[in-house]
Amino acid sequence: MMTDAFSTYHPMVNFLYFTLVLLFSMFFMHPVCLGISLLGAFSYNVYIKGKKAVSFSFKYMLPLLIATALINPAFNHEGGTILTYLRDGNPLTLESITYGIAAATMFITVIFWFSCYNAVMTSDKFVYLFGRIIPALSLVLSMALRFVPRFRAQLKVVSNAQKCVGRDVSNGSLLQRAKHGIKILSIMVTWALENAIETADSMRSRGYGLPGRTAFSIYRFDSRDKRAMVFLILCGSYILLGSILGGLYFRYFPTMKGVRFNAYSASLFLCYMALCILPVIINLREDRKWEALQSKI
């Protein structure tokens, strides 16, 4: 696992970036766009999480991709290029197979991007961005996102403690396992309620909700963030305008047809690639700088 330099950028830059790549990944169904977005999401995910991301991809994402690609032709029989007929008499078309692969690619790409989003956009960044606009909702969302990993960690601690005294869900008969599970659930509910009371008392003692209360922030919008923001706005606007003008057009039914590959479409693909691999480029550049500084020591 490497140190992510892109996550040190201003929260506005991080949020704008993930908004662009997630929206573009969900709506651009051109095969080249799907491949570029998948490459960018996978490479960034691997950079952040290392071998865990590779293992997760082969264990879960690859089977999901294959399963989704196979399910679509079984129910979708549209398309003009008939390859064969199924046992029930419905046609198996090239277009349905291709669309199934494209839909599966889009699905796992969005999962990869959301995985990167959860690693970069922490709860404090979310509260910083939306705390003044939607204070109650941003607080609830940040607390919910923070609660899930804490609940899992505490559940592991409680399960290990119960296992030491022979009261884990893996010990005893079926009825005893059920009783042990209920006991662990009761402990976790009690812990969650006590934690909620402690959080409420802490917030009240720190003046939450009082008029004129200020909030401390460690984020500063510097020149580095300005350059990144200008790049994201220009690049995102160019891609969006190109999509509106049909530069990224592609259809799967009734027959596959897309925009002709020319200099304009190539510029859109290159711009989209630059957007998707931006965090990896930033991280690799920072890694080279660090290695150069170390070599001078």
Image (cartoon, rainbow, N blue to C red):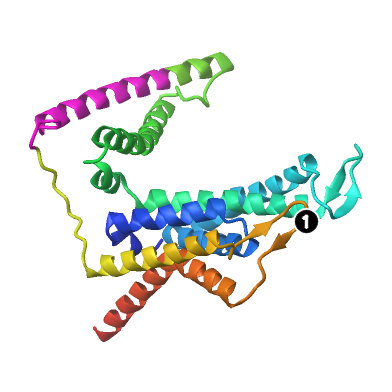
Residue 257 place in picture, x, y as percent: 72, 61
Give me the residue at 19% from left, 26% from top. Answer: 200
Residue 146 place in picture, x, y as percent: 33, 38
Main secondary structure of the magenta stretch: helix
Residue 73: name its quadrant: top right
| Near-viewer residue (208 or 258) | 258
Residue 235 place in picture, x, y as percent: 42, 67
Q: Is residue 52 above or below residue 39?
A: above
Determine the secondary structure under disc 1.
Answer: loop
Q: Which residue is mark 1?
A: 255
Q: How many marks?
A: 1
**Res. 56 in view:** no
Q: Amino acid at mark 1?
A: Thr
Give me the residue at 37% from left, 37% from top. Answer: 153
Q: Is residue 117 left or right of residue 228?
A: right
Q: Is residue 16 above or below residue 168?
A: below
Q: In which quadrant of the rendered image does the N terminus lie?
A: bottom left
Residue range corresponding to the magenta coloring: 183-212
Residue 14 place in picture, x, y as percent: 34, 57
Q: Is residue 62 above or below residue 155?
A: below
Give me the residue at 14% from left, 30% from top. Answer: 209
Residue 182: name its quadrant: top left
